[in-house]
Image (cartoon, rainbow, N blue to C red):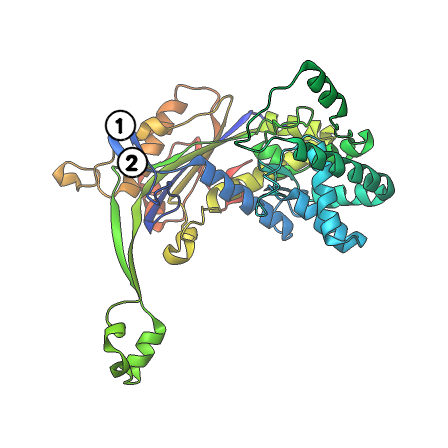
Amino acid sequence: MTEAPRSQYLSLHLIETLAAVLPVRDENAQPKTLVFGGVERHMITSQARRRAERVHTRDRANAGRGALSGRSMGVRTREWAILAGRELETEHGWDRDEALATTRAVMEASGLKFGDPKKRTVANLTRVLIFAPSDAAARIAEHIAGQEEAIRAWRDEYLTAQAELAARKPRRGAVKKEETSEDAESASSAKPTLPPLPKATRDAILLALAPRDAIDIALYGRFLAEIPDSPNVDGAVQTGHAFTVHEAEQIEDFYAAADDAKLDRKRNALSFLDAADDAGAGMTGYQSLISGTFYRHAVLDRIQLRTNLRVAGMDEEEAETAASEAEKEFVTAFVEAFPEAKKNSTASTGSLPALVLAFEGERPYNYASAFQRPVDERSASAGGEGPAGPAAVRRLLRHHTFVSGRREDLENARVLTYDPEIDTLLKELGLPGSVSVVERTGELTP
């Protein structure tokens, strides 16, 4: 069995510089911000970061790459009934409409709420996103196909009762007539009730949607309140909001999009046909873009990760192996993954960090306070710290050296850079012996 880790928490800290991007935006398509140290900073939310890292890890595993190659992973969606219906249709030969009606009925009877049945776009979507193993739909379909006679009979009874209940529901705005106690008693006795889902089928649905051995659910956790007896998972990863180490700088980029057909007419001397229509650009507008040097931070709770894997059914040795593999991929995703908003028009996903600092400890360590005073990018001769990237690296390493001198639990500190100027800076700074320089992401964790 692999040797148990010496410390519970792996802390990761990263400095990266981005130019003219928009990784995440608010409801008004504006960059997200926060106020810190008395000035406004640009922010990349932890939600955006976590999704980017989770999807990066899942896609690598599904593609047979990385330490988690071939491991079970999860999918977060509202479309489980649709996916299970598709499995029933393609793998078990059911009619498409019947398959979808059946999967929706069994999942609804299990305790999940669906959208308004009168609205086609949401009728077969669960009200909330459900994070479940990627094979959940296939498992649900397989159970239904194996019990098709009994489930078909139950479904017909369920849908009939559901339709009768819907018909009895008073229309909005209808005047409610006075009813006597005899009327109420008669209506109550005649009111149809929904037949309960057979226990074996409900158990199969809950098992299919349970976290089981999905590694990304063990890492990032999940919460499903609609079914009290469906297990929730406390995530092993903590993620902080990334923010600029200096005051926010935003530009409103005016753009003009060309109309190809209009330009072709001009190019072929046909614009005289209707010169007025050929004036100006095809479309114009503005987009908000940001530039800056960001600090971001995340923590892996190794004990929680192993607990989650053990609860999922792994024995101690298997959980240890899976946890070690998950840790490597977590570090890789933290360094390489990036939110994909406007990725094509800004190439933001190609960025690499100026510095990554990783170390172990008996508790999480967040170094955001190192940047409470915003970096002044003026030259040293003008009283500033120079460019924000090198200045942030100096601050982060100085902060870590100071803290580690007062906290005995900090150990195995490692730094990685993809910037040749920062590499030169690290040599100039003369890192303490407790900090090692590495060249690969896999070397950031023991």
Q: Residue at x 29, y 56 (%)?
A: 285
Alpha carbon separation for disc pair 2 and 1: 9 Å
**Residue designated by label 2:** 41
Question: How many labels, in total?
Answer: 2
Q: Please, is residue 35 above or below residue 263 in the view? A: above
**Residue designated by label 1:** 37
Q: Please, is residue 48 above or below residue 231 in the view? A: below
Q: Tell me the quarter of the image containing the N terminus.
A: top right
User: Residue 376 location in percent, x, y?
Assistant: 21, 37
Asked whether, in this view, residue 271 is left or right of residue 203, the answer is left
Quadrant of res 403: top left
Asked whether, in this view, residue 97 is left or right of residue 349, the answer is right
Q: Nearer the viewer, residue 124 or 116?
A: 116
Q: Residue at x 29, y 47 (%)?
A: 291
| CB-based contact (under 8 Å), mark 2 and mark 1 | yes
Q: Residue at x 28, y 38 (%)?
A: 391
Q: Nearer the viewer, residue 193 or 414?
A: 193
Asked whether, in this view, residue 197 is left or right of residue 210, the answer is right
Q: Nearer the viewer, residue 320 or 254?
A: 254
Count neighbours of disc 2 (C-alpha within 10 A) and say few if under 14, some if 14 to 19, many if 20 or more.
many
Question: Does residue 369 show up?
Answer: yes
Identity of the amino acid at label 1? Gly
Question: Does residue 318 show up?
Answer: no
User: Residue 294 location in percent, x, y?
Assistant: 34, 40
Badge 1 marks a residue whose secondary structure is loop
User: Residue 180 location in percent, x, y?
Assistant: 66, 16
Identity of the amino acid at label 2? Arg
